[in-house]
Image (tube, grey):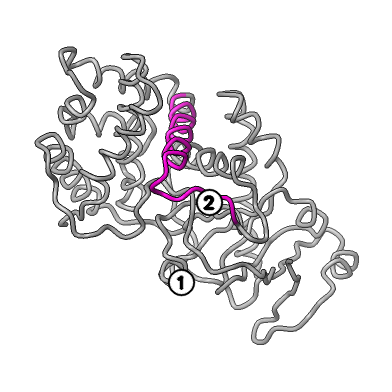
Amino acid sequence: MKKHYTPPPVSECKLDRFSMFCVLCVIIVASVWLMTRPSKTGEGAQTTSPTPVAKTVSSPSGQKVHALETAYFREKAKVPEIWWLSDLPLNPEDGAFVQKMMDREKLVKNTLDRFRKVSPLAEQIHTKFGTFAVSVFLRGNASITIGQAHQIKQAGVEICFVAKKQAGTLEKSINAPSSLYWRSDWGMFVNAVEVPYSVFAGLLYHELGHGIRHPVSLTGKGYFTPDSSEYVAEEIEMHRLETLVFNEASGGIFEKTIAEIMLRNPKALHVTEVMAGVTLDDLGKLDRSIGADKAGLETSQLLFAHYMIAIGTAYSDLKSLGIMEQISMFRWLNREVFDVPVKM
C-alpha cells in the first residue's frame, strides 16, 4: 500500500496532501510515495540480460554482428549523454524542478495521444494509461510524485524518472537491466537522459505494452522468467510495436530502410545471414530516420538491439516464419551478441 508524505528540505514529516491542495488551490504539490514493494529485478527491459556474463561468439554470423555492435558503440561513446535531471532538489517544491517534471508530463501525454492509432495494442495502452503520474526516484522503494492531488490519486500508472546521481544506486539495488524498463510491482522506470522524441515515443509504448500484459500489483508476481518462450514472445510483440511507432514518427522511412537492408541479400538462407550483412552505414541511416544520429551510448545500446530485432521480425514476415522461429532468432541474438561483453 502506498503511504503519502511530503518532505521538507531537511527532514521528513507526515502531511495531509489533500488539505495542502485545498489550501494552495492549483499550486503544484510534490509528494513522496513510500511504497511497500519487494526488492526485485527490473522487468520488461529492452534486452534480457541485466549483467553480461563472460561469453564468446561461436558462429561466423554472430562474430560479424558482434563486431558491428562494438564499432557502433565505440562511435556512440564519443557523444556525451545529456541528463535533464542530474540530482534531486533539496526542496521538491522548487519551481525549476517542478517545471521540469511538468514538461515531462506534457511530453508523455502528447506522445500517448500522437501514436495511439498505430495498432490496437497502442490504442489499448492509450486508454489504460491515459491518466498517469510522473515521479522521480528518491531511494529504496520511495519516489517523489509531482502533480495536483486529484491527478495523483486517479493515476493509472506511475512513470518514474531517475536522476543521474540516483541512477547508479538504483541499478545496484534492483539489478536494473537497462536505462528504461517496466516493473510490475511499481510502474515504468526511465533514466532522466535526453533522447530524440521519436526514440522516446517508441520506448514509451514498448514499456507500457509490458504494463498492459503485466499490470502493477503489490506482489509484482506473474512476470515470465527471461529464459521462457513466453517472455521472448512478449519482447518480440513489444519490439514490433516499437517499430510501428518509429515508422510513424519517421513518416515511413524507418520500415523502408529496414526493408532495404533485409532485401539486399535475397539469397540469404537464414536471418542470421541478413544480420551479418548489416553495416555501420545502415545503422546510420536507421539512426537518421528517427533523429538518433546524435544519440549517446546509453540510448544507442537500446537502439542497436531494436534494429537487429526489427530486421529479424521483418525477415520472419517475408518468409512467413512462425513465432517459434522468431523466438529462436531472438535467443540467437541474445546468445551471440547481446550477452557477449563489448570491449570499448
Q: Earlier in the sequence, mark 1 or mark 2?
A: 1
Q: Position of residue 114 (x, y in %)?
A: 60, 30
Q: Disc 2 marks which residue? A: 182
- Magenta span covers which residues? 221-247
Q: Residue furthest left?
A: 60
| Magenta part, dominant SS | helix
Q: Which quarter of the figure is the N terminus placed in?
A: bottom right
Whole-Å distance between the Cαs marked 1 and 2? Answer: 16 Å
Q: Residue furthest bottom?
A: 11
Does residue 287 appear in the picture of this structure?
A: no
Residue in front for this viewpoint, 82 or 217? 217
Task: Determine the residue positioned at 31% across, 60% down.
Answer: 51
Tag 2: amino acid:
Trp
Magenta stretch holds residue 223: yes
User: From the viewer's perspective, is 152 left or right of 303?
Assistant: right
Q: Residues within 10 Å of mark 1 (few under 14, many from 20)?
A: some
Q: Disc 1 marks which residue? A: 173
Tag 1: amino acid:
Ser
Q: Position of residue 124 (x, y in %)?
A: 66, 32
User: From the viewer's perspective, is 10 left or right of 296?
Assistant: right
Res 333 label? none
Task: Determine the residue positioned at 36% across, 25% down.
Answer: 313
Q: Which quarter of the figure is the C terminus placed in?
A: bottom left
SS at mark 2 in the image: strand
Mark 1 and mark 2 residues within 8 Å of each other at the beta carbon: no
Residue in front for this viewpoint, 91 or 181? 181
SS at mark 1 in the image: helix
Q: Position of residue 267 (x, y in %)?
A: 15, 13
Q: Quadrant of residue 217?
A: bottom right
User: From the viewer's perspective, is 278 left or right of 7?
Assistant: left
Q: Position of residue 268 (x, y in %)?
A: 17, 18
